[in-house]
């Protein structure tokens, strides 16, 4: 096992729960924007990351639009900790009455794949509602690394096993498992350095403390433009319109490598199908709004709602693929 995951200070926080009343509601069988959500309580979207993060911004954008379409208040509640596991645990245990939703992002599937004690199952504990958007991440290296492409990086790392450092946003997250996937495919040995968030890892990459990392295109594009970091490849098979000069994984010789950072809504398992379908229909209208499309484009994301069952299949494939990487790499992560 190459990743430095054992012995790190655990930071799993206590599960924060919210007392919920037994209020009931009914949903009108209308399909247009005037459909109303009747009840004494608002719908809450739990964002399992801190305010001002990219996931939080997405949650607030969607909440505001859904409020207009569903005719009721939709509020964002931040439940941070354990790479998103705290918020996921809370929604998994919430009443399946349609008043609690989780804004799921990539850690929703990577964390339980890597950590058996994550406290939730992304498939068995939730009802998929709908995808919002997705987009690739980007591999970057600092300027001290004599490689301009991912194949060059792999060749350089193979000659220096264990000496290249890779910074991630924390153990079990998508950044961490991207490294494990690369190692599993290529046989290289790179040292994993987990941080509490991608921002400090990025700063250390610029400063030369770590040589390699991955992150979202909006987060790393300024450093790429300023020449502080070198973009080696995006994590999708094809190039991204947001970084047209950067090769995709197909050009890097790994055409079947396709890792997406995604945003989706899920509800507690057992949420009535009629409720799931109404939220899904409203979500499709949100993503089709010109201002939302423009916002997603700025964030290097592609709008992709689809049906709840399509999201369910996506999450199942994603979860199983990460579990396979964890098994192949022999990861033993006890805590965050």
Image: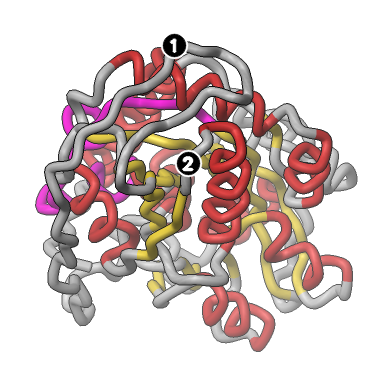
Which image quadrant for residue 205? bottom right
**Image coords of residue 194 (percent x, y):** 38, 72
Per the rendered image, the range of residues in magenta is 109-131
Front residue of 150 and 238:
238
Q: Which residue is mark 1?
A: 29
Front residue of 236 and 209:
236
Distance Cα–Cα, label 2 vs label 1:
15 Å
Q: Earlier in the sequence, mark 2 or mark 1?
A: 1
Q: Which residue is mark 2?
A: 72
**Image coords of residue 27 (percent x, y):** 37, 22
**Image coords of residue 156 (percent x, y):** 62, 60
Judge the density around disc 1: few (<14), some (14-19), many (≥20) Cα neighbours within 10 Å: few
Tell me, yes or no, whether the highlighted magenta stretch contains residue 151. Answer: no
Q: Is residue 187 visible?
A: no
Query: Which residue is at 56% across, 71% downward?
Result: 52
Give left or right: position of 155 versus 38: right
Query: Which residue is at 14% across, 50% downward?
Result: 21
């Amino acid at each position: 096992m190459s990743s430095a995951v054992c012995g790190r200070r655990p930071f799993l926080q206590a599960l924060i729960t919210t007392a919920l009343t037994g209020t009931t509601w009914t949903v009108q069988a209308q399909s247009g924007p005037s459909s109303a959500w009747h009840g004494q309580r608002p719908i809450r979207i739990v964002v399992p990351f801190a305010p001002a993060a990219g996931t939080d911004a997405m949650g607030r954008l969607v909440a505001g639009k859904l409020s207009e379409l569903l005719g009721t208040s939709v509020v964002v509640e931040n439940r941070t900790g354990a790479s998103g596991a705290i918020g996921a645990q809370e929604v998994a245990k919430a009443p399946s009455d349609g008043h609690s939703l989780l804004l799921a992002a990539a850690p929703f599937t990577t964390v339980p794949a890597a950590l058996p004690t994550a406290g939730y199952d992304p498939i068995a504990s939730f009802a998929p509602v709908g995808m919002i958007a997705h987009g690739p991440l980007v591999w970057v290296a600092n300027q001290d690394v004599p490689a301009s492409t991912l194949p060059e990086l792999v060749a350089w790392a193979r000659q220096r096993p264990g000496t290249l450092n890779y910074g991630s946003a924390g153990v079990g997250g998508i950044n961490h498992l991207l490294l494990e996937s690369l190692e599993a495919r290529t046989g290289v040995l790179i040292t994993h350095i987990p941080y509490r968030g991608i921002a400090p890892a990025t700063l250390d990459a610029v400063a030369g403390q770590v040589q390699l990392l991955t992150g979202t295109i909006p987060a790393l594009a300024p450093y790429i433009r300023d020449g502080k970091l070198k973009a080696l490849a995006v994590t999708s098979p094809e190039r991204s319109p947001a970084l047209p000069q950067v090769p995709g994984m197909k050009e890097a010789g790994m055409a079947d490598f396709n890792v997406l950072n995604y945003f989706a809504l899920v509800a507690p398992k057992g949420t009535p199908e009629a409720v799931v379908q109404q939220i899904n229909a409203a979500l499709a209208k949100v993503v089709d709004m010109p201002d939302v499309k423009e916002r997603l484009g700025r964030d290097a994301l592609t709008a992709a709602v689809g049906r709840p069952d399509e999201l369910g299949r996506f999450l199942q494939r994603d979860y199983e693929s990460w579990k396979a990487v964890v098994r192949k790499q022999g990861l033993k992560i006890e805590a965050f």
